[in-house]
Amino acid sequence: MPIHGYRRLFRLAIALLIASAAVGRTATAHAATPSHPTLNAASIDAYVKAYMERTDLPGAVVAVTRGDQVVHAAGYGHTAAGKAMTARTPVPVASLSKSMTALAVMRLVEEGRVDLDQPAHRYLPEFTMADRRAGKITVRQLLNQTSGMADSAYPDLTRPQAHTLSEAVADMRGARLAARPGTEWNYHNPNYFVAARLVEVVSGRPFADYLATQVFRPLGMTHTESVDTTDDMPDHARGYVRAYGMLFPRSHPRWFTAGGHGVVTTADDLSQWLIAQNDQGVSAVGRRVVSARSVDVMHTPPKGREYAMGWSLSPSGEKPRQIRHTGQLLTHNAIQTLLPDSRTGIAIVANTGMISGDDAAVMLDGLVDLAQGKPPTVRTPFTMKADYVLAVLTLLAIALGVLGAVRARRWARRTADRPLWRVGLRMLPCAVPIVLFAQLTDLAGLFMNRRGTLAQLGYAWPALVIWSVAAALASTVVITARSLAVLRTRRTRVLTAPGVPDERTDAEQVFVGRATDR
């Protein structure tokens, strides 16, 4: 691609981003509901339906509580299988599962069977790594994700997926730590694989059984379970991905999920979960499942950090104060939040994937506004605007690639008198999209603090991958066309130079003569 083509591309991208932001602000301003709203079933229902109408979100479940009362629990739209979603539709909550695993561990702590500040290896001798420092990882560090394990050292989503917790822990034996235990925070699912396996070994029961009998049933979560893989989820966790304003149903690849992101539940059961969290461990029917102190421990991060045990504190100064956690699969996204000042709980699960979806997090903003007595604004995921920018950039990249290939011979003639090394330097900018594509997953990993594959990124943000592929292919075509044109032009000039014997046939001389005339 010519260098001036990149300048045009950059200027157009900036202009389109500014325009899309302006359109977004105008649209959200007109979407506001009447003033003086109240957090009740009717206002929640109206807001969710307005959001779904504007974004074409296929389906979602919503649970809202205040104190020990359920304000609203409902399902909207349909699943990827076409079934209507209700308050009893089972949905995967992905990483919201971590807070439930943490509560299971705290049950063992209260029984005196586990000490948070003892090395996990003490309770789980099979947990070993190719790093001696791993022997010092405490149970607490697993739960608040300061163990030193990280995707940079052990990218679990790019590896063959385990089938059981025992296998998941065994797979870590050859892994190293990214940092000394307790010194850094890194979001890493294997922390919770180890914690879940610890629950199994200490309790002497399968992790799913322990969660069911010691956490879910006591809380009244009668339609909730923990599964080992996405294949065990309803319809194999099939959901949707969004691209260019359209939604496409997609099956989910098999991921191991137990402990970290394997809970399947309903809006009704999420209501019970939120009530217990806001009521210091007491269920909706008055049964204490865990002590108030344990709830405080799970909600309180280490000094200087925001992540606690399956929960994160909102940044200092943010109002209202929230204790929350997100959850993401490639085909579903979820969020739960507690508003301690009003004892409000909100949980949302949508059947769209991460990044291109993120509907749950966007919807949460509107429901938090309602909880504060403010009129909610119907916003949209940023990719719904960004995808149109990427679509234009994709078409522009293709057009510039075709143009560059068509004009390759002219470009070669203009550079015919320059040394080849200078010609090569002039083509270097054309390689930028190729390098970008080659590093796309790494760049996305830096942004998300997670490492994945290109196929997974294709689920997460299809329009970004399509643009990157198109730009890389266009650049490859231009580089190839220019390189061939340069070689032909220089060979022709050598063969037709004065004093060089011409041993070609008459037909070849006529052909070269015509090519030179052109």
Image (tube, grey):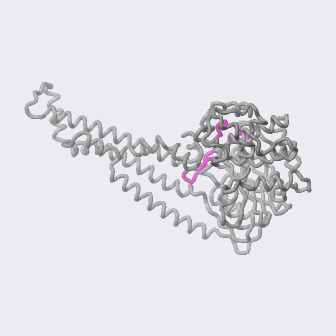
Which residue appears at 69% of the width and 70% of the height? 375
Q: Is residue 339 left or right of residue 431?
A: right
Looking at the rendering, in which quadrant would you find the C terminus?
Answer: top left
The residue sitting at the left extreme is 499
Percent of width and height locating residue 346:
75, 59
Q: Nearer the viewer, residue 441 or 504?
A: 441
Q: Nearer the viewer, residue 306 or 264?
A: 306
The residue sitting at the bottom extreme is 35
The residue sitting at the right extreme is 286
Q: Is residue 353 visible?
A: no
Q: Is residue 211 visible?
A: yes
Position of residue 461 relative to residue 324, above or below, is above
Percent of width and height locating residue 314:
68, 60
Q: Quadrant of residue 33?
A: bottom right
Q: Quadrant of residue 366?
A: bottom right
Q: Is residue 243 magenta?
A: yes
Q: Nearer the viewer, residue 79 or 422?
A: 422
Percent of width and height locating residue 229:
72, 37
Percent of width and height locating residue 63:
78, 57
Position of residue 22 relative to residue 347, above or below, is below
Position of residue 311 relative to residue 195, above or below, is below
Q: Is residue 306 magenta?
A: no
| Count of numbered tags | 0
Q: Is residue 47 left or right of residue 178?
A: right
Q: Is residue 152 left or right of residue 107?
A: left
Which residue appears at 60% of the width and 45% of the height? 450
Q: Please state the extent of the stretch shown in magenta in the rendering.
A: 233-257
